[in-house]
Amino acid sequence: MMPLHLSPPLWGLVFALCAAVLLWLLSLRLRDVSIIDIFWGPGVAGVVDIAAWLAPASGPRASAALFLVNIWAIRLAAHIFARHSSIQGGEDHRYAAMRRQFGARWWWWSLVQVFLLQAILIWFVPAPLVAAMLAGAPDLGVLDYAGIALAGTGLLFEALADFQLARFRADPANRGKVLDRGLWGVSRHPNYFGEALMWWGFFLIGFSAAGAWWLILSPLLMTFLLLQVSGVTLMEDTISERRPDYAAYKRQVSSFVPWFRSKS
């Protein structure tokens, strides 16, 4: 049999699709589709790691990018796993609603609607970092330093926002209340803002390495998803019903980009 010769990006796609199918089969047994969310960070990092291993990537650019994306993946997976473990009944309410909507078709439709869709995103989103792994010139430039600073700031911003929210939710006295202190006093979704900032930083690193403008589709897509699909819009559709004080908070605090608090 002839050996299978695939480029590093295509091996990343094989990894993402195989992992998605295996997780889908596990979700059928557990009746819990939200396990795919725990895999999001490690899946993205895995695509980059495969490219780095097969390239093989070397130099300060590859080292910095690999460090940042893997630290982000480990932290995010641990955070989502802890949040998932605290949910009564296990499955995230968004997927539980989809399960009720699709009924008997959900067992196979979830493969397409959730797992394969996320597999494609897991493969495509880290394209700037994959480009950085495959670049022949390992020396750092101005855009690399800017990208590393931006990505590192975004990662810290997201981690601190998640920590503040987790600590707030852990106090029973805060049940039904709105967190309006710390980073949550300057942005209603500072964790999503930090995530977006990180991907714009990764784009700068990838663009510095490859000079390909199409890589900007990665941060644009992530920002769109965070704002319109799985982030801000989805959260704010239901949060006002669960927290009466959220309407006043919404009037005073910026939705996404951190800004001075309004007194209105």
Image (cartoon, grey):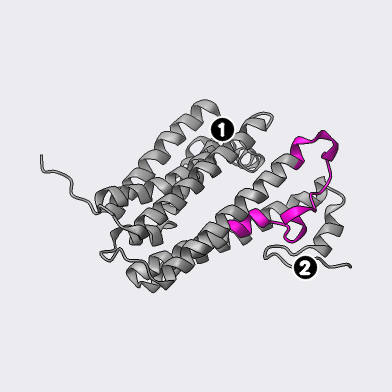
**Are the residues at dot 2 and dot 1 in contact (C-beta closer than 8 Å)?**
no
Residue drawn at (65%, 47%), measured in percent from left and top? 162
Residue 194, image x and y in percent?
60, 58
Q: Quadrant of the C terminus?
A: bottom right
Q: Where does label 1 land, which residue?
A: 32
Quadrant of the rendered image containing residue 157: bottom right
Quadrant of the rendered image containing residue 212: bottom left
Of pointers 2 and 1, the one earlier in the residue sequence? 1
Residue drawn at (75%, 61%), measured in percent from left and top? 186
User: Closer to the camera, 110 or 166?
Assistant: 166
Residue drawn at (65%, 49%), measured in percent from left and top? 160
In the rendering, which numbered label is found on residue 260?
Answer: 2
Going by the numbered disc 1, the residue's amino acid type is Asp
Q: Per the image, is 236 magenta?
A: no
Crowd band around label 2 with a 10 angstrom C-alpha radius: few (<14), some (14–19), many (20+): few
Q: Quadrant of the N terminus?
A: top left
Q: Is residue 178 visible?
A: yes
How far apart marks 2 and 1 lie (CA) works out to: 40 Å
Q: Which residues are magenta?
A: 168-195
User: Closer to the camera, 78 or 99?
Assistant: 78
Residue 163, image x and y in percent?
67, 44
